[in-house]
Image (cartoon, helix red, strand yellow):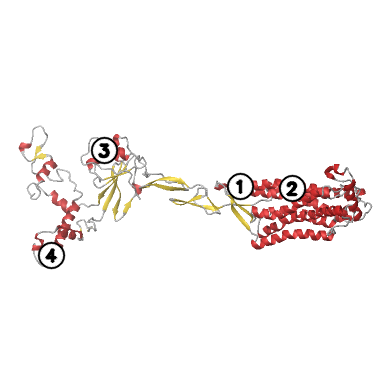
Amino acid sequence: GLCISQSVKIPREPRVGEFDKIIHRLSENTNARVVIIFANEDDIRRLLQAAKRANQTGHFIWVGSDSWGSKGAPILNQEEMAEGAVTILPKRQSIKGFDRYFISRTLENNRRNIWFAEFWENNFQCKLSRHAVKKGSGIKKCTNHERIGKDSSYEQEGKVQFVIDAVYAMAHALHSMHKDLCPGKVGLCPKMETINGTLLLKYIRNVNFTGIAGTPVVFNVNGDAPGRYEIYQYQISSNNTGYKIIGHWTDQLHLNTDEMQWPGATQEVPSSICSQPCRPGQRKKTVKGIPCCWHCESCDGYQYQADTYTCKMCRFDLRPNGNHTGCVPIPIVKLEWSSPWAVIPVLIAVLGIIATLLVVATFVRYNDTPIVKASGRELSYVLLTGIFLCYATTFLMISTPDVFVCSLRRIFLGLGMSISYAALLTKTNRIYRIFEQGKMSVSAPRFISPASQLVITFSLISVQLLGVCIWFGVDPSQAIIDYEDQRTANPETSRGVLKCDISDLSLICLLGYSMLLMVTCTVYAIKTRGVPETFNEAKPIGFTMYTTCIVWLAFIPIFFGTSQSTEKMYIQTTTLTISVSLSASVSLGMLYMPKVYVVLFHPEQNVPKRKRSLKAVVTAATMSNKFNPKGGLRPNGEAKSELCESLETQ
C-alpha cells in the first residue's frame, strides 16, 4: 500500500552540493513528506544539514534504519531537523557476564585483544610511553592502576548479544556438521579437513538454540533471523528531549500512538500522500506506473461511483443521489387535477357538459315542438351524446392512468368525435342526396327516413368501435412509466411519466377515422352550400365544419411540435382535451344554441308553418334554382325560396 515517490542513491564519495541536490529531488512532490533513509550516520548528518540549508525544518518526517538508531552524533547541533524522526534498533539485552569480564580487563591480564593497549590509551586519555607525552598537551602517562567503569564511563556495546549468538551459531553448525561427517570421532576427520562453505551455510541455517539473552536463535530460508526491534522517536519538549521508545516489533508491530509527537509538538499525524483523497462521487484515475498517484474524475450525468476506480450508469428507472455514490428511484409524475394544465380543460369541459345537459333537457321538454322536430330529433340526440362524450373525455385524460382508465381512453377518446361527425355526415349526406335527386327527378331518394338515418349513423360509428376492438386484441391496454419522456441532462430534474401506452402514432390512428368523417362532412357541407337559405340545417353545419377544421389544423402543429419538450405530457394532454372540447363546443353552439334560444325566449316563432309534401318541397327548390336568373348572384349561389318547413318534418 505504499509507493515510492523518489528513490535517490547517496554516492559512496559524494561531491560538494550532492546532498543539496538530493534534498531538492525529495522536495519535488510537496505532498510526499516521509523519507525512509538507509545510510551511515555521517551521511545522515550531512543530509539533515542540507535540509536545514533548504529551510525544510519540520517538513520531512524521517524514518531511519538501525544505523541511525538512538545515536546522538547524526543530529548534533541540528536537533530541530530530526524532530519527529522514527528510528529502530534491534531488541537487545545487556549481558552481565560480559560486563564482569570486560570491567576486569587490565593491561596485565589481557592476552587476547591486540588493540587493547590502544583502547586503554583512548579510554583513559593517557599514554603508555613516557616519550609520547608532550609537555603542555594535558595528556598524562598511564599508571596501569586505571580501572574500566571506575576511572572512565562504561556502557556495554549494544550488539554484544548478537556477537555472542553469532559465535554460538557457528559453533552449533560446526558441531552438527562434525556429527554427520565424522560420527564417533574426536577432532577433524578427512571430510572436514577442507570445509565446504555451501554445506556449512546449510548447517548454519538449520541451527535452533536458545541465545545468551534467552531468545531463540533460528534463521529463515533467506538466512535472516527473526526481527526483534525497539522503535524510537526523537522528540523535543520543554522538560525532556531525546529518543523515546514508542513501540516494538516482535513478529508484528506494537505501536503506542499516544506516545508519539510530531514536529511542532503536535499529536496530529502528518500526511504523506501523492494525491488528495477523492470526494464522494469521484473515481480515481491512476497515473500510469504510480498506483499511489491519481486524478479524481467526477461521476457525472446518470453515473454513480460503483467502486474506487469505476463509475457506472444507473439503471433506466434510477438516477444518482446527491453525491453520486448510489442510485435512487426517479420520481414519478402525472397530470394532477390541481395543475394549471388541467384546471383550464376541466373548466371548459364542465361548462360544456352543463350546456349540453341544458340543450338535452330543453329538447326533451319541448320534444314535440316544430323547431325540435325540424332538427331531426333522433340524430340530434345521437349528436348530443357524442358532444357529451367529447367533454367527458377530458376527465379520462386527466385521471391517474391504470388499466381501466387507459382502456376507457382508447374507447371514448375517438368515440365521442366519431358519434358527432357520423351524425353530422349523415345529415349533410341526406341533404345533399335530396337536392341532387331533385335536379334529376321529383321522386324522393332512398334511406332518408329517421330509422334509415340511425342505421347509417350507427354503421359509421361501428367502424370506430371495430377498430378499437382489434387494437385491444393485438395490444391490450396498460399503464406504463415512461422514463425517457422527461429524461433531462440534469438528473435532478429527471422524472418518470405515468401514462397510458398510447403512442403518437396510435393516437393518430385513433383519431384518424374521426378526422376522415370530419373531412367528408366538410366536403358535403361545401356541396350543399347552395341549398335554399330557409333550409335551417345546411348553413350551420357548414360553418360548424369549417370552424372545426381550423381548430384541428391548429392542434396538429402544437401537439406534434412539442414532442421533444420536457413539458410534453402537459402540453399535449391540454392541447388534445381543449381541441376535442372546442370541436364539441362549435357543434353545440352553432347547431343547437340558436334553437334553444328561440324555444326558450321566442316561443312565438316556435309554431308550425303550412305543410307541403316532400314532392312539392323538392320541386319548388329545384325550379327556384333553375328559373331564378339572379339566383347565382345570391351569396354562395343560394336560391331564395319559400320553403315553409324543413325536410325533417316530412
Provide the residue designation for mark 2.
549
The secondary structure type at the circle numbered 1 is: loop
The secondary structure type at the circle numbered 4 is: helix
Q: Amino acid at mark 4?
A: Leu
Q: Is 471 in front, or is 41?
A: 471
CA separation, marks 3 and 4?
54 Å
Sequence-wise, the earlier of marks 2 and 3 is: 3
Numbered label tally: 4
CA separation, marks 1 and 3?
68 Å
Provide the residue designation for mark 1.
564
CA separation, marks 4 and 2?
119 Å
Provide the residue designation for mark 3.
19
Q: Is 200 in front, or is 364?
A: 364
Give residue 118's position: percent from left, percent from top. 10, 43
Provide the residue designation for mark 4.
181
Q: Is 336 in front, or is 378?
A: 378
The secondary structure type at the circle numbered 3 is: helix
**Residue 123 figure quarter:** top left
Q: Amino acid at mark 3?
A: Phe
Sequence-wise, the earlier of marks 1 and 4 is: 4
Give yes or no for contact between labels 1 and 4 (Cβ–Cβ under 8 Å): no
Identify the residue at image location x=27%, y=50%.
230
Which residue of the protein is positioned furthest toward the right in this rendering? 610
Q: Amino acid at mark 2?
A: Cys
